[in-house]
Image (cartoon, grey):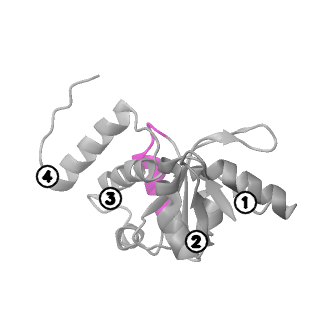
Amino acid sequence: MRYVVDADSYDAVRDVAVHAGALVVNASGPNELELLQVINEELSSASFVEMTRFDIAQLAQPEPYAHIERGGRLVDAVTTALEADPVLAEIAHFEPASRPVLWWPAGQTDGGRRRLPTLVFNANNPTVQKLLDDPDAPLAADTIRALHIVGLLLARTQVPVHGANLLVHAIAGLTGTAVEVVPA
């Protein structure tokens, strides 16, 4: 069983854990972590293992998207739309369908190479399905940019100022309004 040590991490994984049927304990209170450690010691095996909000892929267990050409077109559109803030884009099926994307930060591979931040688009989500149908639609790039920021927010990750500006411009594009953003 897994646990997280802060409430933000719990909020970031809760919906995915529920749909995966996985127990994740919120050990953010003053005594919960100590209690879990006592239970682990008494059971003589580590029954409770700490996880972070970025271990969400282990809970979601994304299933590969089978339509390679169709998914590849969306990955290309994501690469173009997020050229200024590159991510590794993937398409997969996972639950809940209401969660359009999973996001986790850049890191190092086992070989020591740098890995880009990863954004996994949920092929079960209606918005993502529309992007898969037509990744070159007039509003697709703005939708992709907005979903990128949604992924950061759902992961309870700090959105940088340029990310907030990106979201403002994406919303402006999606609503057809002009917005002037003052540089930070």
Going by the numbered disc 4, the residue's amino acid type is Gly
The mark found on residue 176 in the picture is 4
Q: Residue at x 24, y 42 (%)?
A: 168
Which amino acid, mark 3? Ala
Q: Position of residue 182 (x, y in %)?
A: 21, 25
Q: Residue 81 magenta-drawn?
A: yes
| Region in magenta | 74-85
Of pointers 4 and 2, the one earlier in the residue sequence: 2
Vertical relation: 12 (above or below) 21:
above
What amino acid is labelled 1 in the image?
A: Phe
Disc on the earlier residue, 3 or 2:
2
Left or right of 38: which side holds 82? left
Q: Which of marks 1 and 4 is nearer the N terminus?
A: 1
Image quadrant containing the N terminus: bottom right
Q: Work out which residue is located at the far right of the displayed protein and give it.
A: 44
State yes or no: discs 4 and 3 in contact (Cβ < 8 Å). no
Q: What element carries label 1?
A: loop
User: How far apart are labels 3 and 2 at the CA level?
Assistant: 19 Å
Within 10 Å of disc 1 (Cα), the crowding (few <14, some 14-19, many 20+) is some
What residue is pinned by disc 1? 48
Tag 2 residue: 68
Question: Could you tell me how far apart the alpha carbons at marks 4 and 3 are, in whole angstroms?
Answer: 13 Å
Report the magenta stretch's main SS: helix
- Which circle's residue, 2 or 1, is located before the other in the chain? 1
Q: Nearer the viewer, mark 2 or mark 1?
A: 1
Residue assigned mark 3: 140
Specify the farthest residue to the left: 177
Q: Which residue is drawn at 66% across and 40% down?
A: 107
Q: Tell me the residue at 33%/51% (across/down).
A: 146
Residue 168 in view, yes or no: yes
